[in-house]
Amino acid sequence: MASIANVLSSFTHKLSSRPKSHTSSFRMSYQTTTTTTIPRKSANYGPPTWDFNFIQSLNTNSYAGERFVTRRDELKEKVQDLLNSEEIKEAEKIEMIDQLQKFDCSYHFLDEINAALTDIYTKKSGYNNFKSSEEKDLYSTALEFRVLRQNGFDISPEVFEGFMDGKRLDFNPKLGEDTKGLLNLYEASFLSKEDDTILEVARDFSGKHLKQVIKHDQNLNDPKLLPHVQRALALPLHWRVPRMEARFYIDSFDLGKTNSNNSTLLDLAKVDFNIAQAVYLKDLKFVSRWWKDSCITEKMEFVRDRAVENFIWALAKHPSQSIQMAEEQWASSTFFFARLMICMTFMVLQKNCNSSPIPLKGGPM
């Protein structure tokens, strides 16, 4: 116990005595500070390409009449009969579905298309007929593969094994003369999944030969295919915006640059495109007025005035089923999605303009 007391005593110390006088020598000092206004960052965005008055002057009544909707419904019934017909061969029905999707009017026939493709897939998968590619040409096999896979059917790329060499390392060099088949093989290769090595080989093989067709004009047995080959090499069909791509295919079919044995599909595509355009222009006018009435660009000069660009973004993101919604309600869902895009763009710009000028690590400012 004595040793513990000695240790404790060694840590004791005397507190300093409190001063007797309570007077403090502290003096309050005043220091004037000058506030500096930090200028808000701005990218000096230019004015919008499309003026507000120009947008409001767009005519939206040309194809908004009842007679155009009636004409479209009549054509829809004819196409429905074709899709439900059992007399049409499977290859012709696949081509018809592909054309409807390229025209971006397939949303009118979702049930009919799903039933037709399910029937084709069930018949062939049940008898393992997908591997009998020797009986088909490259065009039919590639088109069937692409249409089925892009509509959610799990078709195996082994259907192309009949067109490869004996070692399954590359495709038969004789296929280099089949431009139409190579074009569809190239488009189909972009629907590959993980470990689809056959489609990777198909993309390299078809892309190499198609580039030679463009460069040297070789093996182009059908000159009508040239613009389609150029377009596919620039950006494959699977990556393009369907509604904007529809105009290219309508013009291509209308000018005879693409073979089509069914004029009903082309007539439906034209009427449906014009009706959809009228709906989109009406929505664009709504969005433009809503953006102008918000006065955000006047109160906050750093904001980009890009209502049309955001509307096109929403149009590319949203499916064409919004047109059917517009016929039942007062506006399509593209109208609401466009306003959401504008608000998101505004919040990003506001955050960037209020952020620190010090760039983050790992990327440019």
Image (cartoon, grey):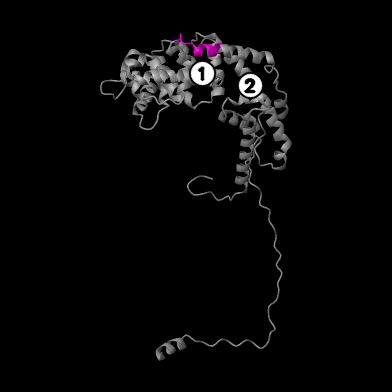
Q: Quadrant of the N terminus?
A: bottom left
Residue 196 lies, with reference to residue 225, above or below; the image says below
| Residue nearer the viewer, 3 or 52 | 3
| Residue nearer the viewer, 39 or 296 | 296
Determine whether, in the image, residue 186 is placed left or right of residue 244: left
| Residue nearer the viewer, 85 or 45 | 85
Q: Give the main secondary structure, helix, strand or loop, of the magenta stretch.
A: helix
- Identify which residue is drawn at 34% across, 18% down: 129
The local crowd at label 2, few if under 14, some if 14 to 19, many if 20 or more residues have their Cα within 10 Å, is some
Range drawn in magenta: 78-88
Where residue 231 appears, as percent x and y from the top left, is 48, 21
Is any part of residue 212 visible from this angle? no
Where residue 273 appears, as percent x and y from the top left, is 60, 18
- Identify which residue is drawn at 61% across, 46% down: 351
- CB within 8 Å, label 1 to label 2: no
Where residue 98 appears, as percent x and y from the top left, is 48, 18
Determine whether, in the image, residue 100 is placed left or right of residue 48: left
